[in-house]
Image: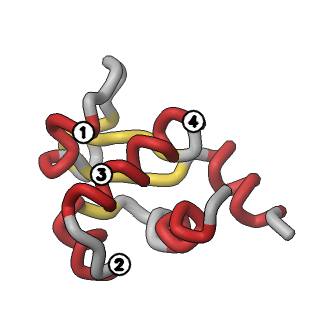
Amino acid sequence: MSEAEFDLMDELYFVQSFAYLKEAMGWDDEQLLAILQQLYGKGYIKCMIEPDSEMFEKADILQDGKEYFYLATKKGLMYHNTRE
């Protein structure tokens, strides 16, 4: 897990919008979407279409990621918390 991925995971213990993540991280859209895509590809986060409505189809973060909400998965939290 890269430093950027690790830092972003810190924000995903609770459901967060793209707008919140952009403000909290101070990254541009392209960088944030790319890192979200990396975490999603590893199974460390899940995407939601509303704060309480998980997506079950494959998400296209690079195309539609600004509309999603994000949350760390159990796998992601376990990896994040055991990183040395």
Mark 2 falls on what kind of element? helix
Q: Residues within 10 Å of mark 4 (few under 14, many from 20)?
A: some
Query: Which residue is pictured at 75% across the width and 65% down the height?
Result: 81
> Which residue is disc 1 drawn over?
62
Mark 3 falls on what kind of element? helix
Residue 71 placement (x, y as % from top left): 43, 53
Circle 3: residue type: Leu
- Say which label, 4 or 1, has the lower sequence index: 4
Q: Residues within 10 Å of mark 3 (few under 14, many from 20)?
A: many
Q: Residues within 10 Å of mark 1 (few under 14, many from 20)?
A: some
Which mark, by number, is residue 25?
A: 2
Query: Which residue is pictured at 43% across the width and 65% down the height?
Result: 14
- Say which label, 4 or 2, has the lower sequence index: 2
Mark 4 falls on what kind of element? loop
Relative side of 53 to 80, left or right = left
How far apart are the alpha carbons under marks 3 and 4? 15 Å
Residue contact at pointers 4 and 1, CB within 8 angstroms: no
- Say which label, 3 or 2, has the lower sequence index: 2
Q: Quadrant of the C terminus?
A: bottom right
Q: Residue furthest top?
A: 57
Circle 4: residue type: Gly
- Say which label, 1 or 2, has the lower sequence index: 2
> Which residue is disc 3 drawn over?
33
Front one among 77 and 37 = 37
Front one among 20 and 42 = 42
Circle 2: residue type: Met
> Which residue is disc 4 drawn over?
43
